[in-house]
């Protein structure tokens, strides 16, 4: 008899997905805050809802892009073997 195959394939190397999602969310929030502070420093009194949505979308894209660039450089997470 052959040994029982594992149910799950080996997990990919690198940080877990939830950590990358949290990193992307944090970076996106940071980019959005910086963009809004720059707009305020430029003398913009108020932005429309469409302008706010544009800032949020651009921040999300930039945060995701930076996370994809940083992910390969992050250390692998060592998990204990499953019993």
Image (spheres, rainbow, N blue to C red):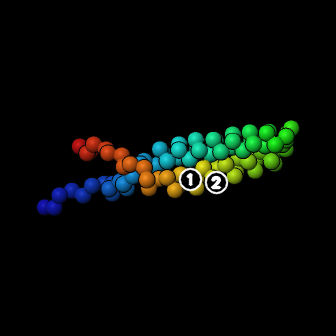
Decide which of tag 2 and tag 1 comes sooner along the chain. 2
Q: Quadrant of the C terminus?
A: top left
Asked whether, in this view, residue 45 is left or right of residue 58, the answer is right
Residue at 32% x, 45% y is 78
Picture quadrant of residue 13: bottom left
What percent of the width, then of the height, locates residue 9?
33, 57
What percent of the width, then of the height, locates residue 77?
36, 46
Asked whether, in this view, residue 26 is left or right of residue 15, the answer is right
What numbered label is drawn on residue 61?
A: 2
What percent of the width, then of the height, locates residue 7?
31, 54
Residue at 85% x, 41% y is 44
What numbered label is drawn on residue 55?
A: none
Mark 2: give few (<14), some (14-19) or many (20+) Cα within 10 Å: some
Q: Secondary structure at mark 2?
A: helix
> Can you say whether 83 is above or below 58 in the image?
above
> Can you say whether 49 is above or below 68 in the image?
above
What percent of the width, then of the height, locates residue 2?
16, 61
The residue to which callout 1 is attached is 66
- Disc 2 vs disc 1: Cβ atoms closer than 8 Å? no
Q: Secondary structure at mark 1?
A: helix
Pick out the residue farthest to the left. 1
């Amino acid at each position: 008899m052959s040994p029982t195959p594992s149910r799950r394939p080996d997990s990919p190397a690198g940080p877990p997905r939830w950590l990358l999602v949290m990193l992307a969310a944090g970076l996106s929030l940071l980019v959005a805050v910086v963009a809004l502070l720059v707009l305020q420093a430029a003398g913009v009194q108020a932005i429309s809802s469409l302008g706010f949505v544009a800032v949020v979308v651009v921040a999300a894209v930039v945060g995701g892009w930076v996370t994809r660039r940083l992910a390969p450089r992050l250390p692998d997470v060592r998990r204990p073997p499953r019993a």
